Image: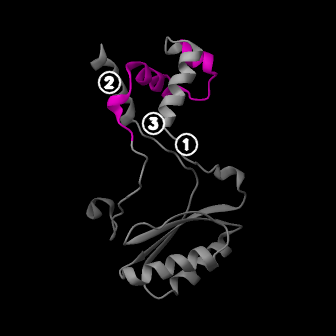
Amino acid sequence: MESLCGHEHSMKWEVAFPECDPEKMSVTDWRILRVLRKDPRRKLVDIANDATISARTLKRRLDHMEDEFAFFLHAQVNLSKLGGVAYRLLTYCDDIAKKGAIDDYVLSSIKNVEWSYTLSDEYSMFIIHCENTIEAEHIMNLVKKQDGVSKLRMDIIEDQITVEDWIDEEIEQRITAAR
């Protein structure tokens, strides 16, 4: 993977998601998810019509799926509302004993850390809001000086797009199998 991406370090995500048993979901639930995937911001009555159920049934099934963690909220920062510039700071540390101290330093000493991921043994990721590139370079230099930092990378985040197309195929398979 590292040679394909042209990077020394590969990244792996170990994010704990709430557990859901898809076998407990009805074909109606899968039809609802299919409609929601197209446009989740529509009115409930319109979603219900497209799923060929009543608005009352839709509300009841949505409550059930939320309780069973079939779906859940996932925060997505609207970067255009922040002002300034959003940066992604990746810190790599070969010594796990020093990694915690580096993470603590960034989280306690750097202002405007909007989000962080520190669960990996090899790296940490921070989204930092800066007023300008001079402030970002200053932060990068401060973190670079921390004992144990083996590699550091800082990029401007222009847009954040979450795409999980695999679920569309899963939804269709579940609906087809129930027929």
Nearest the viewer among 170 and 87 is: 170
Q: CA distance from mark 2 to mark 3?
A: 17 Å
Q: Which residues are magenta?
A: 20-49
Q: Residue at x 54, y 46 (%)?
A: 74
Residue at (43, 85) in percent of width and height: 148
Q: Is residue 167 left or right of residue 35?
A: left
Q: Earlier in the sequence, mark 3 or mark 1?
A: 3
Closer to the eye: label 3 or 1 = 3
Mark 2 — residue?
Answer: 174
Which mark, by number, is residue 73? 1
Q: CA distance from mark 3 to mark 1?
A: 13 Å
Q: Which mark is residue 68?
A: 3
Query: For the residue carrying disc 2, how many other residues have a C-alpha within 10 Å: few (<14), some (14-19), or many (20+)?
Result: some
Figure quadrant of residue 86? bottom right
Res. 106 visible in picture = yes
Alpha-carbon neighbours of circle 3 within 10 Å: few (<14), some, or many (≥20)?
A: some
Residue 136 drawn above or below residue 164: below
Q: Quick one: SS at disc 1?
A: loop
Looking at the rendered structure, the kind of residue marked 1 is Leu
Are the residues flagged by discs 1 and 2 in contact, CB closer than 8 Å? no
Q: Main secondary structure of the magenta part?
A: helix
Q: Residue at x 37, y 58 (%)?
A: 14
If you read the primary sequence from the N terminus, does the residue marked by circle 2 or circle 3 appear first? 3
Residue at the spot 54% in from the left edge and 66% down from the top edge: 126
Asked if residue 45 is among those painted magenta in the image, a careful observer would answer: yes
Q: Position of residue 60 (x, y in %)?
A: 54, 23
Please state which of the two labelled residues, at mark 2 or mark 3, is closer to the viewer: 3
> Is residue 114 magenta-colored?
no
Q: Amino acid at mark 3?
A: Glu
Color encoding of the figure: one colour
Q: In this rendering, would 85 be left or right of 116? A: right
Q: Does 43 appear above or below 141?
A: above
